[in-house]
Amino acid sequence: MQDPHPLVNRISQISEKSRLGIFEYNIKNNVFTIANSVFRKIYDLPLDEYPVVRLEDVVKRHIDPVHNDYDNKILEATTHWLMGISDSSDEGYRVYHRNGDRLNVNRVASYECDANGTNCTIIGSVYDVTHEHNLNQALRMVALRDSMTGLYTRKGFYEYLSELDSTEGWLYQMDLDYFKAINDVYGHDAGDVVISDVGNILFKIATIQGGVAVRMGGEEFVMFIPENSVRTNDMVNAELEAESIAEQILNDVRNYKFILPNKQILEDRTISIGIAYHDKDKNIDDVISLSDKALTYSKHTGRNRYTVANNDFLSILYHRGGDINIEDIKRAILEDEIYYVAQPIVNVKADPKIIGFELLMRWDLEDRELSPEYYAERVESVARENERYMIKLEQARLKIIRRIKALWPEAYISLNATIDKFAVKGAGKEFLNHLLSTLGKMSAYDIVLEITETAGVNRYSKKTIYEELSYIRDAGIRIALDDFGKDSSNLTRLSELPVDIIKLDKSFVDTIDILNVNSVGLRTAGSIRLLAEKLGITIIAEGISNSSIAMAMKTLHIYNHQGYHWGKPSSIKDLAYLTDID
């Protein structure tokens, strides 16, 4: 006898082999008129227990059996099955079996009614996608968790925040101090150990405080402590508590003994921290940016410390131009708000005579006057990355140089650069070629390069820096060590760098007691002059603000001066007024 439904049976066979559950649900009768074996298996509905499958039998498998509000969840699931389908539906579900198995299931369904619209059914299919779901979860974990530390990645951190009811709390941004030196001296395996162990330290602290730790990349970490973990609503005390957590981080990292792959123990590593509070009115990216600025301040003011981005810090940030962004800099360059001035360098051995000019960057800001130390490096960084802005700055610099050379043909031009620019092989040649190509008819002998030290100078190869600066010096450019006597600039640099000139920093000159011929300051300045003379190095005294200091320096046979007594930094139009130096 011929099978009356060969096509239906064939479709059923195909669905069984392809693990596709198919169903037809009659709404009026509240029963599944079709529920193949795959459908029954997915929903844990054996044929002998459920010869007639009802909707309640199916929706029960969508509810976690341990759910506190089980009955109400059954009602919600039933409603969703009936009302959640419009013309078609493609949805993911979790299915719970009685033996504890949990499946992930996709369902595709649609309505079908007769001509009168009275007899309606829901027809569709379900498919077990547990394996695919688990693979996706594994891939997701790779994206959300850092493989070295097990901490959240940046992406994982943002997802964590998205799942919080409230994202108010303290955000700590951290950076290991001088981490590059670990890789350079001990190797990258040692660096990996330090990263991993610091991640573990931060994980423990964050967990105790009810928060999370994040590895943002490299040696950069973030820790977030939600507000509900802070034990007081008083903001002053909350800040003190946030600071105590920062102190713990500093101490735990500083006191930790890192055991390197070669069994050597690395001690006294430090970390710098910036802290900002995230409230409901702030964007998390803005808070991360603010904490990053606080972190930068910590690094620039000594490292191994923390800075809280409170109102006092915001005031400091404002007066240091920390609120200025890259777009502000680009606009200022194009609109000629950023320009150069020149301050004379005078020789007073006989009659005062201008021998050179130091070029200094300036920025016209309506509401404040910022020192170039707060923006010059950022401006030059923008220019290096975009030729349009570089050309604009070079034109501004060349304009004042031409004016100087027209008035003082024999004067040299003194330019500034940070020492880290010459820490890479080939940097000297690249710098020289670019400089000479942008200075018109000037030769290398007309130029003095003033080198300013940066906070991380000890991380770089002294040999490379010496070689690259020597390349420039051999071409005729004289090398000046700026800010001598300030911070890390000291006598050892005279043996580590090819120096022609040292510039006594204003902060050192200001300490000299000119009324006491036996003062330590005067004797030290005299000793530096004698040493420089023996080494064939010229001295320039900066910060000469009055005739008394000028006379004291002349008495010590320090004849090259720079300071307001001899002339303020002048714009192009004001340079002519400097022709009468006396």
Image (tube, rainbow, N blue to C red):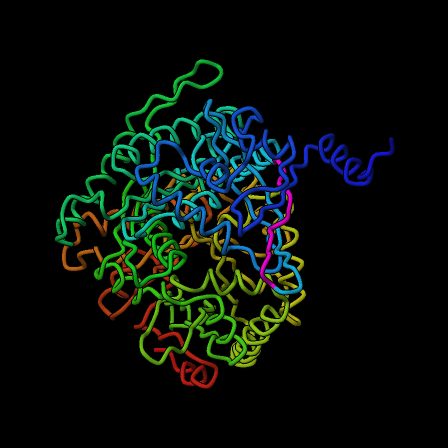
| Of 190 and 400, the residue lying toward us | 190
Report the residue that reaches farthest toward the top: 263
Residue 463: give x, y in percent of width and height: 55, 36
Q: Magenta stretch containing residue 454, yes or no? A: no
Q: Kindly indicate the quadrant of the structure image that contains residue 544.
A: bottom left
Q: Kindly indicate the quadrant of the structure image that contains residue 150.
A: top left
First to last magenta residue range: 117-128
In the rendered view of the protein, which quadrant contains the C terminus? bottom left
| Of 516 and 318, the residue lying toward us | 318
Report the residue that reaches farthest toward the front: 1
Asked if residue 464 is positioned above or below residue 380 in the image, the reply reads above
x 34%, y 59%: residue: 541
Q: Is residue 11 visible?
A: yes
x 34%, y 45%: residue: 72
Residue 295: give x, y in percent of width and height: 34, 49
Asked if residue 287 is positioned above or below residue 96 in the image, the reply reads below
x 36%, y 75%: residue: 567
Asked if residue 420 is positioned above or below residue 380 in the image, the reply reads above
Residue 552: give x, y in percent of width and height: 25, 61
Q: Magenta stretch containing residue 123, yes or no? A: yes
Of helix, strand and loop, which mostly describes the magenta segment?
A: strand
| Of 335 and 1, the residue lying toward us | 1
x 49%, y 43%: residue: 497
Residue 15: give x, y in percent of width and height: 72, 35
Q: Kindly indicate the quadrant of the structure image that contains residue 324.
A: bottom left
